Image: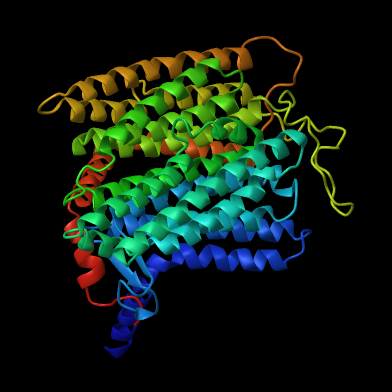
Amino acid sequence: MSPPVMNASAASAWSDHVVVLPIVLPIAVAGVMFLLDERRRRLKEALGLATLLALLGIALVLVGRAGAAPEVYRVGNWAAPYGIVLVADRLSAMMLALAGLLGLCALVFSFARWGRAGPRFHGLFLLLVMGVNGAFLTGDLFNLFVFFEVMLAASYGLVLHGSGEVRIRAGLGYIAVNLIASLFFLIGVSLIYGTMGTLNMADLARRLAAPAASELALFEIGCAILGLAFLIKCSAWPLGFWLPTTYAAASAPAAAILAILSKVGVYVVVRLSLLLFGAGLSEGFGQACLLGIGLATIAYGTVGILASRDLARAAGYAVMISSGTVLAVLGSGRDAALAGALYYLVGSTLAAGALFLLAEVLQRGRDPVEQAQPVFADEYRDPFDDADATEIGRILPAGVALSGVGLLLCTLMLAGVPPLAGFVGKLAIFSGLTGGTITASSWWLIAILTLSSLGTLLPLVRLGILTLWVPHDDPPPALRASELAALAGLLAACIGLALWGGPALAYADATVQGLAQPQDYIRAVLGAPAGGAP
């Protein structure tokens, strides 16, 4: 009987380290990739694919294990708030699964073309995924800054990947904006540490129970500056002007994975708002501002989609609308509506990622960004200089039909039209806003979200007609198997989210209920026995 006991003990020990794997695994594989020669492209693709599949599986395991109490991992077995703490609860597990699925499909799409359009693509891709995962799991603001910077540094390389004047111009603007955001981040973190003496999120929530009046004012100033940094990352109005131009100029797989970066800002705003300002002396701090900023972001994104002339730019504005929806609902203070907003965030992010990939396929050869030839070293073959450059892959007999169906699904999803998950999410938001006492802000939010649905539906249908139905001299859409697989994965996830909308909404509702009880988070991080290292 001893071998089964030993095996069970070993399995339990490995299970304790699952929380840290989304950080350790991609950075370890990325290090190996940077040591490999660029001509080992197939090996890099295989390593990247295996890593993203493993990360998605780990995220799904954490989603299944998520319960009322967060799962805490203490690095080096140092107790909080002095040691590094990783915390996996329902919200972070959900965001890890979203990042894993989006990253997997974007990476598979890059196998057809963009993975060889420049050096170090796969290593930078995994570093970005590592930074995103770390931001979702970290339990303190210092390491949040570390992961934030790793994520941004990798995103700089991905935005510029493929070269060309348009990408470089947009990428330099993107770098400048994010350096400013990092400066605000440092100033905010410094003020918070100077007033509270800690950067651990759970310890901050505990100390807010009885702060000095002078410290409270300075602490709130620091939180406001910190919030400004994440609102820039959320692409909230008026700070999100950079997003549509940057994402439209980036390569399709880079733009698809960059769609999750704005959700990192949304995640942090939701986390800190409910953990630090859900109760106590600072209860409701910044709530009205979030409501106003969220409404303005939805309106700005809707006007931007109406004015868009290409699908990639429209997808960038759709990312802004998704972020603005969550911010506005969070500012409304309705927990029931917030569950619907989180559900909508997942579906709209997947649909926006699919729309970036579809835009690459449908506008291939007509996009002025594509006409800017990337710069390659002499020893690498330029995939865009072939005589049959427009014939990227075998033209599928149903290529136009498949692209049209994909565009239709993305349109219905982003516009919130039945029967897909976008409609289910917005209906859940409306139900949460109209439950109990209905305020004027709730009516404003319902009206703007309704108009936004119409303002998203009309231009996407118009762009679809212009792209697919209007006669032109360009060849029909050509797809490779990897491109078709990536698009099918994202669209299948959107459909699955609607088919299993009941369990998904129940998970989102349980997530919000857990966020509304910060004492469970504080108790798990500060009071639970150490479980990081055996």
- The total of numbered circles placed on residues is 0
Residue 323 coordinates in the image, percent (x, y): 40, 35
| Residue at the spot 44% in from the left edge and 34% down from the top edge | 236
Query: Residue 387's image quarter?
Result: top right
Relative placement, left or right, of 42 versus 279 is: right
Among all residues in the image, which is located at the extreme front? 214
The N terminus - image quarter: bottom left
| Residue at the spot 40% in from the left edge and 47% down from the top edge | 225
Residue 521 coordinates in the image, percent (x, y): 23, 60
Relative placement, left or right, of 375 versus 52 is: right
The C terminus - image quarter: bottom left
Residue 44 coordinates in the image, percent (x, y): 67, 59
Vertical order, 146 against 415 (above or below): below
Relative placement, left or right, of 41 versus 450 is: right
Relative placement, left or right, of 399 versus 207 is: right
Vertical order, 428 against 449 (above or below): below
Among all residues in the image, which is located at the extreme top? 471
Q: Nearer the viewer, residue 490 or 187?
A: 187
Q: Nearer the viewer, residue 149 or 305?
A: 149
Query: Residue 473's image quarter?
Result: top right
Residue 173 coordinates in the image, percent (x, y): 64, 39
* Residue 421 can be seen in this image: no
Vertical order, 3 against 15 (above or below): below
Q: Nearer the viewer, residue 433 or 257?
A: 433
Vertical order, 215 against 9 (above or below): above
Query: Residue 11's image quarter?
Result: bottom left
* Residue 278 can be seen in this image: yes
| Residue at the spot 54% in from the left edge and 44% down from the top edge | 257
Q: How is the image coloured?
A: rainbow
Among all residues in the image, which is located at the extreme right? 378
Among all residues in the image, which is located at the extreme bottom? 2
